[in-house]
Amino acid sequence: MNIREKFELSDGITILACAGYDPKFDVVGKTFSLVLGEEVRQTLTISGERKMLNQNSNLDQRAFETNDVVSLSQEEARSGEWQLIGE
């Protein structure tokens, strides 16, 4: 999945808006590597899914949440170059 946006909530949850996912694959509870090319920055676990507030304009995206601290800046997330790859 390609990361398109990152949001950090005050309760410590991070939301990652992602595109290029397989809708048949349940990602909740699964572990993913945060990857750019050959670089693996970290591993994180998806703890849930959120409703996209602007879903009509982002039909190809889903919003996933994690309790892990995500070592990715908002600029990096918006670049569209970072991916979540299943373990």
Image (cartoon, rainbow, N blue to C red):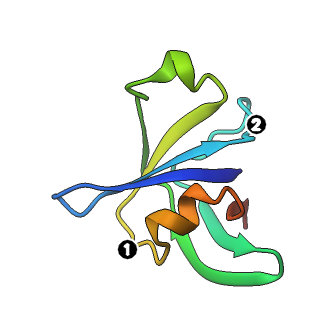
Q: Mark 1 vs mark 2: which is more N-terminal?
A: 2
Quadrant of residue 12 within the rendered picture = bottom left
Can you identify the residue that label 1 sits on? 69
The crowding category of the residue bearing disc 1, from other C-alpha atoms within 10 Å (few below 14, some 14 to 19, many at least 20), is few
The residue sitting at 48% across, 46% down in the picture is 64
Q: Nearer the viewer, residue 65 or 5?
A: 5
Which amino acid lies under the numbered mark 1 shown in the image of this protein? Val
Q: Nearer the viewer, residue 20 or 46?
A: 20
The residue sitting at 72% across, 62% down in the picture is 81
The residue sitting at 72% across, 40% down in the picture is 21
The crowding category of the residue bearing disc 2, from other C-alpha atoms within 10 Å (few below 14, some 14 to 19, many at least 20), is few
Residue at the right extreme, as displayed:
38
Left of 29 or right of it: where is 13?
left
Residue 50, percent from left and from top: 40, 35
Secondary structure found at label 2:
loop
Which amino acid lies under the numbered mark 2 shown in the image of this protein? Asp
Residue 9, percent from left and from top: 24, 55
Label 1 with label 2: CB-CB less than 8 Å = no
Secondary structure found at label 1:
loop
Residue 65, percent from left and from top: 42, 50
Q: Nearer the viewer, residue 20 or 76?
A: 76
Q: Say which mark, if any, is on residue 22.
A: 2
Q: Say which mark, if any, is on residue 85.
A: none
Residue 82 vs 50, above or below: the answer is below
Q: Quadrant of the C terminus?
A: bottom right
